[in-house]
Image: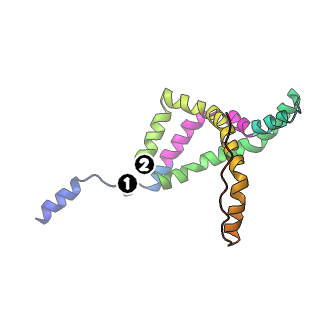
Amino acid sequence: MKSLLLVALLALPLPSLAETREERVAAAAEYIDLALEGFDMAAMIETMYQPILQQVAAGGQTQTEAQVAQIRQLYLDTYEGPMNTLMRDQAGIMADMMTLAEITALRDFYATPEGKSVMAKLPQLTAAQQPGIIQLINDNMESLMPQVLAIINGEATPAATAAPTVQP
């Protein structure tokens, strides 16, 4: 009976615990290398300052091409290296959160033409979503901040006020 139980246990697939963290980190590093190959970091960084330029323009002030180029370079100089470092550092985070099979699936996807195309389009996706996210945050900040401060100060939380309705 014991040998039958042992054979049954050996026939079961090994759990993800049999994977080592080092294996997951290595696979995640491969995924990150593939993902960054087609990733337009400059375009992603441009999404960071575009809302500022739009807000300034909405206030009636125009920027020259030279000013925009100077702001772009400032942002690139400030964020390009650190953003690459942050993205590369995610290998350890991925290894702690995902199985080897999940990381391998991501890596394999980004090695395909479709995966490369998706990665190249992520900055545009971020840029398209950013105005809506900023508006959502701005619309709710006035009612959220008193509640956050009340929680921090150990006070009774003030009643939430309805967020303003956005008109199309």
Q: Residue at x 49, y 52 (%)?
A: 95
Q: What amino acid does circle 2 point to?
A: Leu
| Segment colored magenta | 26-48
The quarter in which the N terminus is drawn is bottom left
**SS at mark 1 in the image:** helix
Query: What color scheme is it?
Result: rainbow
User: In the structure shown, which secondary structural element does the residue marked by tag 2 occupy?
Assistant: helix
Nearer the observer, 20 or 140: 140
Residue at 68% x, 40% y is: 166
Where is residue 2? Give x, y as percent.
Answer: 14, 66
Q: Are marks 1 and 2 in contact (CB under 8 Å)?
A: yes
In the figure, 77 relative to 21: above or below? above
Q: Quick check: can you spot residue 73?
A: no
Q: Is residue 23 left or right of residue 119?
A: left
Q: What residue would you read off at disc 1?
A: 16
Does label 1 or label 2 sit earlier along the sequence?
Answer: 1
Q: What is the number of the mark on residue 95? A: none
Q: Residues within 10 Å of mark 2 (few under 14, many from 20)?
A: many
Residue 100 - label: 2
**Mostly what secondary structure, the magenta segment?**
helix
Asked whether residue 27 is drawn in magenta, I would say: yes
